[in-house]
Image: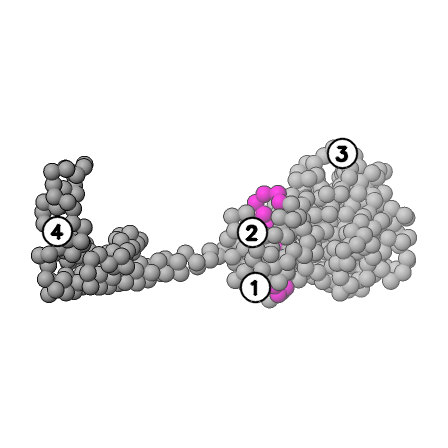
């Protein structure tokens, strides 16, 4: 081999400039460079030729340049050329080996870092393992208002599909098709405030069959028995009661034409017929001509539970969202339903109240602390426990510090959905809550500008104190009394 090898030189330069070379052990680099320089030095022409080449110009007094001698200096023997080639080869191999080892180490380090960085962040999904959770379905609460297109993109980014968008009671959406791990990843997204598993809810009524007595009780301080219900003449006139339930039989004669359809979140349309009866019973307790507390209030049916009395939190939130966006004038809403603690449901109710709607909600029928359930635990709502005709806490009623007051809930007779004249007697905090919603409508008729906090203060302030003989632990001993 004679002269510089272009391939060998380019390989050396490549090894010097490769990113891995920057990470080579210093000793290995020095060894490779020393061997290479030794090989180069043995190939150089005499020192004076180097000096001449180093000057800015070539003197005319110098002998003619022997380019062949510069390429193949005469002082090099065949053996020295062979040794030079060997040294250069060793230098290249040492440097190449060092680069290979360093590159492998670098790749391992970068690979480990990449694997660590690729581990996706995960957040908390509320109610993920609940027995009543709807598989693959979640409610997403956003930290800021987002367009429907943005919500759809966010759901798809994590493997889901947008099933419903919320924009009034809740800034967020419902999404289906997400695995548990995908939901946790979604919960960690900076734009997301909370992810809550969609869950199944049920009405809270217990069927029974004795006569009703509730109206006779809520117009006086003493125990029911005078056979009269005395109420302000306005009777809720000009107030709208939104019944978030199984729908309402709006043609029932007890409503005298004051009931109408609002929204059906189950079928996603505007016909909220009642195929169960529970919603009609509740609505008539609020505003029925015969069975209602606020006999002149208007009723708007908002269906969120199916004909079996069941529904999902996704549907319930949709109903609340609709009420928040569409309510007009003095308004009350009743929710005789509930389930386990649910931050999305709580947030929706709280925002609806903030929009000006007074909410009455059932405490629940588990004979337990109502603070563990939603929407009973929402402080902005009026949470209602159930009392009996003898002014005792109903044996099924929930209780606790989140309760605002008691109202009649055992053996309440009201309208039913089987005909336009049908009635039925049932029990539950579902029956207690609409008594309070009706009382709120009565108060609002005389104070149409009152906000939910003022309404709540008026009702709890007018309630009869210390009448419940066996209130649950921590429960305010206050029994509803209608006030104008």
Magenta stretch bounds: 132-146
Q: Which mark is residue 194?
A: 2
Q: Which mark is residue 45?
A: 4
Q: Marks 2/4: CA distance?
A: 78 Å
**What secondary structure is found at the residue carrying circle 4?**
loop
Q: Marks 1/3: CA distance?
A: 50 Å
Residue labelled with disc 1? 179
Q: Are marks 2 and 4 in contact (CB under 8 Å)?
A: no
Residue labelled with disc 3? 447
**What secondary structure is found at the residue carrying circle 1?**
loop
| 131, above or below 352, in the image | below
Q: Marks 1/2: CA distance?
A: 16 Å
Which badge, 1 or 3, is on the more N-terminal residue? 1
117 relative position to 457: left or right: left
Front residue of 286 and 161? 161
288 relative position to 460: left or right: right
């Amino acid at each position: 081999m004679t002269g510089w090898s272009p391939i060998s030189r380019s390989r050396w330069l490549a090894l010097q400039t490769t990113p891995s070379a920057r990470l080579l052990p210093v000793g290995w680099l020095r060894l490779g460079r020393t061997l290479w320089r030794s090989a180069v030095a043995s190939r150089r022409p005499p020192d004076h030729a180097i000096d001449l080449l180093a000057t800015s110009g070539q003197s005319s007094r110098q002998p003619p340049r022997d380019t062949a001698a510069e390429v193949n200096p005469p002082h090099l023997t065949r053996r020295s050329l062979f040794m030079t080639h060997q040294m250069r080869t060793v230098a290249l191999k040492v440097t190449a080996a060092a680069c290979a080892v360093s590159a492998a180490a670098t790749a391992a380090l970068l690979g480990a870092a990449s694997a660590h960085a690729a581990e996706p962040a995960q957040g908390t999904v509320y109610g993920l393992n609940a027995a009543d959770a709807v598989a693959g379905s979640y409610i997403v609460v956003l930290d800021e208002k987002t367009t429907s297109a943005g919500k759809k993109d966010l759901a798809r980014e994590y493997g889901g599909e947008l099933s419903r968008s919320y924009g009034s009671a809740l800034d967020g959406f419902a999404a289906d098709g997400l695995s548990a791990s995908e939901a946790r990843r979604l919960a960690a997204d900076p734009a997301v405030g909370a992810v809550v598993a969609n869950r199944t809810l049920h009405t809270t009524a217990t069927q029974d069959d004795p006569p009703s007595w509730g109206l006779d009780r809520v117009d006086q301080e003493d125990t029911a028995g005078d056979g009269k219900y005395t109420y302000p003449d306005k009777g809720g006139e000009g107030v709208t009661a939104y019944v978030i339930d199984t729908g309402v039989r709006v043609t029932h004669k007890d409503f005298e034409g004051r009931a109408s359809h609002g929204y059906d979140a189950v079928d996603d349309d505007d016909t909220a017929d009642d195929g169960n009866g529970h919603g009609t019973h509740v609505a008539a307790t609020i505003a029925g001509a015969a069975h209602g507390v606020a006999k002149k209030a208007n009723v708007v049916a908002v269906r969120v539970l199916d004909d079996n009395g069941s529904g999902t939190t996704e549907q319930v939130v949709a109903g609340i969202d609709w009420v928040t966006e569409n309510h007009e004038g003095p308004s009350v809403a009743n929710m005789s339903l509930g389930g386990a603690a649910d931050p999305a449901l709580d947030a929706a109710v709280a925002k609806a109240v903030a929009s000006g709607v007074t909410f009455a909600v059932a405490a629940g029928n588990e004979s337990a602390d109502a603070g563990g359930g939603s929407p009973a635990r929402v402080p902005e709502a009026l949470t209602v426990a159930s009392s009996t005709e003898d002014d005792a806490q109903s044996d099924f009623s929930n209780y606790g510090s989140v309760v605002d007051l008691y109202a009649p809930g055992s053996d309440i007779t009201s309208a039913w959905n089987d005909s336009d004249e049908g009635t039925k007697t049932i029990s539950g905090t579902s029956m207690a809550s609409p008594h309070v919603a009706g009382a709120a409508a009565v108060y609002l008729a005389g104070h149409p500008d009152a906000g939910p906090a003022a309404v709540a203060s008026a009702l709890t302030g007018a309630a009869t104190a210390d009448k419940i003989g066996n209130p649950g632990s921590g429960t305010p001993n206050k029994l509803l009394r209608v006030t104008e």
